[in-house]
Amino acid sequence: MGVEHLQILSLNFHHASIEDVGLLHVPPSEQPAVLTNWKIQLGLQGIVFLSTCNRVEFIMSDDKYFCLGRQAHLIQQFELDPEAFTRIMSAVQTYRGEQAIRHLMRVASSLESMVLGEREILTQVRQAFDLAMTHRLAGDRLRVTGRSVVETAKKVFSNTDVATQAVSVNSLGWQAFKAWNLPHDAPILMIGAGATNTSVGRFLSKAGYNNLHILNRSIERAEVLSHILSSPKVGTLDKLNDALASGPRAIVICTGSDQALLSGEHARMLPPGPLHVLDLGVPSDLDASFRERAELTVVDMTALQDIADQNLAIRATEVSKCEALLEAGLSEYIERLQAREVELSLIELPNMIKTIRNTAMGDIFADDLEGLDEEARQVVERIVTYLEKKYVGLPMKLAKEAVLGQLRKS
């Protein structure tokens, strides 16, 4: 008994390009059929498939070593061209046993993520195991593995500060906006309707800001964001001058343009008074003359990047705590897996005891029971049923304690 059954093939951004990782993507809707085919072809006890924007993990349970030939057979299922196949085969990382469970726990705890402490990976890991279990692809050992991995990662996020300091542009931008303490009915002009402004807009809407005006180069994307944020004020950039003249209290801007959108001329269109600008564009969407406007507060990507670097440094100091929790999680996993192995080895015990009980009651002592009245027979039935349960539970308990006791000594 042990953890050598757990074997993982990993292709991730550490060793391969994002484009090559994407070549191994399988849409969730297709995964049940595809994974079933892999499981049958490769003769696996169980399989879980984790696919994110920057990593693919083939998580497998198999007592036989997953050799290079089987790896090649699996990667060939993606019908890659020869060059891509060669690149991917050389970039795939393999893990087995304790090395595999450590790797998986590190992945789920974000210690292997592009951004240390990002929580989304835990959700993705949980969903991958849930899908495999729903379609009976994981098997008993991977069911235990998934439970231990998720529980350990939750402890990492709950008991350390590895994820408490914001590092994403969206989160940091929103925190900067909140610090301005604007009233919820303050007029806010959003320029740009891409992913960044959409994310910040969701924060604004959820917090109760209800006076949003959305402008974008294309009206279609502006209307999509307008629908998401339930904001009826929407238009294209040819309405920018009018929107500025109306006197927004804050501007959230991220256009993706290679030139600054707001100039000194635009600044002069704004009514006098305090103005807050959250500039999330790279390069900046504000030129130098716009920044000269009186009573102007600007938070841009340079300031946010400084904060992000500081927060990442704080997160990094938590890694040693995370590693300690992972080691504890590994020990708990091995104990849980060993206990489950004992249960499976004794799975026939209840049926064996039941057969003995039926033989005794229905054959060996049948005449004696016939001589008893109804009440006496019910008492005997209750006694035998009680003993049956004890004789099933006690050996399992003793066996698990013996195995786990030896495990703790080793």
Image (tube, rainbow, N blue to C red):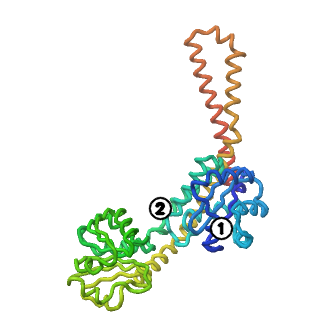
- Give the number of the disc on residue 337: none
Quadrant position of the C terminus in the picture: bottom right
The residue carrying mark 2 is: 158
First reached walking from the N terminus: tag 2 or tag 1: 1
Q: Is residue 96 above or below residue 193?
A: above
Distance from the alpha carbon under mark 2 to that under mark 1:
28 Å
Q: Residue at x 52, y 63 (%)?
A: 156
Q: Is residue 306 visible?
A: no
The residue carrying mark 1 is: 11
Q: Residues within 10 Å of mark 2 (few under 14, many from 20)?
A: few
Nearest to the observer: residue 162 or residue 232: 232
Q: Which secondary structure, mark 2? A: helix
Q: Position of residue 367 (x, y in %)?
A: 69, 10
- Write down the quadrant of residue 306 in the picture: bottom left
Q: Position of residue 196 (x, y in %)?
A: 42, 72
Under mark 1, the amino acid is Leu
Say whether residue 50 is left or right of residue 172.
right
Under mark 2, the amino acid is Ser
Nearest to the observer: residue 242 or residue 43: 242
